[in-house]
Image (cartoon, coloured by chain):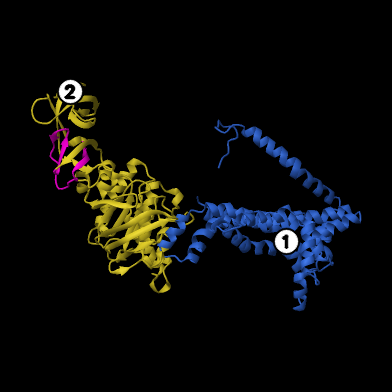
Amino acid sequence: MRTNSQPAAATEGFPMELDIRNIAKDFGGTAALHGVDLHVASGELVALLGPSGSGKTTLLRIIAGLEFPTRGQVFFGEIDASEKTVQERNVGFVFQHYALFKHMTVADNIAYGLRARPKARRPDEAEIARRVETLLDLVQLGGYGKRYPSQLSGGQRQRVALARALAIEPQVLLLDEPFGALDAKVRKELRRWLRELHDRTGHTTLFVTHDQEEALDLADRVVVMSNGQIEQVGTPEDIYDAPASPFVFDFIGEASRIPVTVKGGVPFIGDRAVSAGSGRRAPDGPATLYVRPENVLVRAGAAGEGIPATVATVHRSGSSRRLGVRIEGVDAVVEAIAPAEGLPLQVGASVAVGLRAPGVFATG
Amino acid sequence: MAIRFVQPSVIPGFRLALGFTLAYLALIVLLPLGALVFRASELGLSEIVSLALDERTFKALEISFVTAFLAALFNVPFGLLVAWVLVRYDFPGRRLLDAMIDLPFALPTAVAGIALTALYAPNGWIGSYAAMLGLKIAFTPVGIWIALVFVSLPFIVRTVQPVLAEVDREVEEAAATLGASRLKAVWSVILPVLTPAILTGFALAFARSVGEYGSVIFIAGNIPYVSEIAPLLIVIKLEEYDYAGATAIATIMLAISFVMLLVINLIQGWARRRFGRV
């Protein structure tokens, strides 16, 4: 293993901040992105998270210069990269399906970007070989230089692809579903490894994923996208604990919905007021309350404080029980998590329910 | 690698399929070729060699093989370009153009020969302009070459086209993000992948051109020592009832073709190992 005193793998290019200004993209009349703004700080690791068709990959490809936006600009630091070609942008791009050059050895793949440079900036062959060795060590594939991509596993191929992208000393590193084609175990290993690698090399990194666990686990900040728009930008904690929209509530983690009426800024379930959580206020009128199962507190007995409800379903799952609780007065079943032992919870039992950190959003 | 002939397999019918294939090959390919060699052997080796070294035969063989080689060689970049345009660009009439590629296959070769002669003869549309420049196309090896380019074009296009269509766009994009210019990406990333297909197309085009008769005899003019091709010489021998001589020339052609195709196959095998790791 390398020591920390050694500079990390041929990355003299300093990390670059990234500014995306009002980027929009139409594909033959249908809009893939509607005016997206995003700022990524230097050295940050940011996830673009969203379902397929949310525009996340399109945004990544626009940053790389592989697609051109209908309007808007991309800034690398102070420099407007919008008019630059993909070759000039000097971005490291990692594709979901590796896109390795199958007819070249691993070493030649990694050296490709260096050899493609104009003569004046091209290192000599000895220097290229040295850098390839360093990069192979960095991606833990020392000694694999003479192999061909077909002789490697999926995880190894993706590491070669990453080494190839890092070889050009990129200003930003862009990864499109980098673990999407790998099996679950390898994906987790590689995820942790990528985080470590990022902490060592410090590249400004954007990666696209549709896997919320991956995004929340790996990224400094998560950008949740849907239908060509950014729904929320925040730390993984922000995104999970304080979703900014119904979409984020539904897309990240689990949530149950209860129809409520907002009067004077306070949501009511039937005629019972509930604490609306922090900050957000829905306008008066019909609204929907979202709450996560682990934030639904169930107490036995109808008496005492809490919203009266009855147990509709009980499932034992591992160390806990999952309950479906029907709220009295409204047609809504709320998911809750209760300990496996303790509360005498049977279907039909009367309970009182408390809601923590709910989100209330106007219906419609 | 050891090949075990009888092994339980999910793909049944190995023995039946192999047996049928071998029987079919023997009947359709080996039997006629065997008969050819058998007839030629009536002459004896020394006579065959002296016939091959006979100046007229030698010249005809040279013209046949050199023009065929040059025609196939010319069709490599040209066919590649056609395949590229057909695969990569969408334009009105693309399907029509695609269908036209096969016309040299479908057209009776004699028709092609007559049409080409009409064009390139000294009084033809193109030939008359060439004549003004002092160039003679028809009735020279150049004319033969043009006819062969015409008939062998589809081979390169049709072998390269499907492979090119399968080339992953992401690989080109990867090359671009790494700073490679368009030309460099095509040269270093796409062409190597196409090499085995190009070689196959070349071999097919060459083989077809060597044996081509119908389209060539009209435009060639068939002047002994100048524009007389080996297949024509065979026909002439046949018309003189010199069957042994005809089969002897045929056997010589067969031997040369076989050696050349073998060499191309070896190069292809090397290219597959070198470029074709998929």
Give the magenta part as a residue range: A264-292
Q: Say the numbered circle drawn on residue A345.
A: 2
- In the picture of the structure, the residue carrying the numbered disc 1 is B148
Q: Is residue B67 left or right of residue A54?
A: right
B158 up-or-down from A246: above or below:
below
Q: Residue at x 57, y 57 (%)?
A: B195
Residue A76 image position (x, y, % from top left): 30, 65
Q: Are marks 2 and 1 on the same chain?
A: no
Residue sitting at the far bottom: B133
Q: Residue at x 28, y 69 (%)?
A: A78
Name the foreground residue: A263 vs A198. Answer: A263
Name the residue type under label 1. Answer: Leu
Residue B20 image position (x, y, % from top left): 69, 36
Q: Colour of chain A?
A: yellow
Among the chains pictured, the one given blue colouring is: B
- How far is disc 2 from disc 1 in space, using C-alphas? 88 Å
Q: Residue at x 38, y 68 (%)?
A: A83
B173 up-or-down from A309: above or below:
below
Residue A64 image position (x, y, % from top left): 37, 60
Q: Chain of mark 1?
A: B
| Quadrant where the image shows the N terminus of chain A | bottom left
Name the residue type under label 2. Answer: Leu
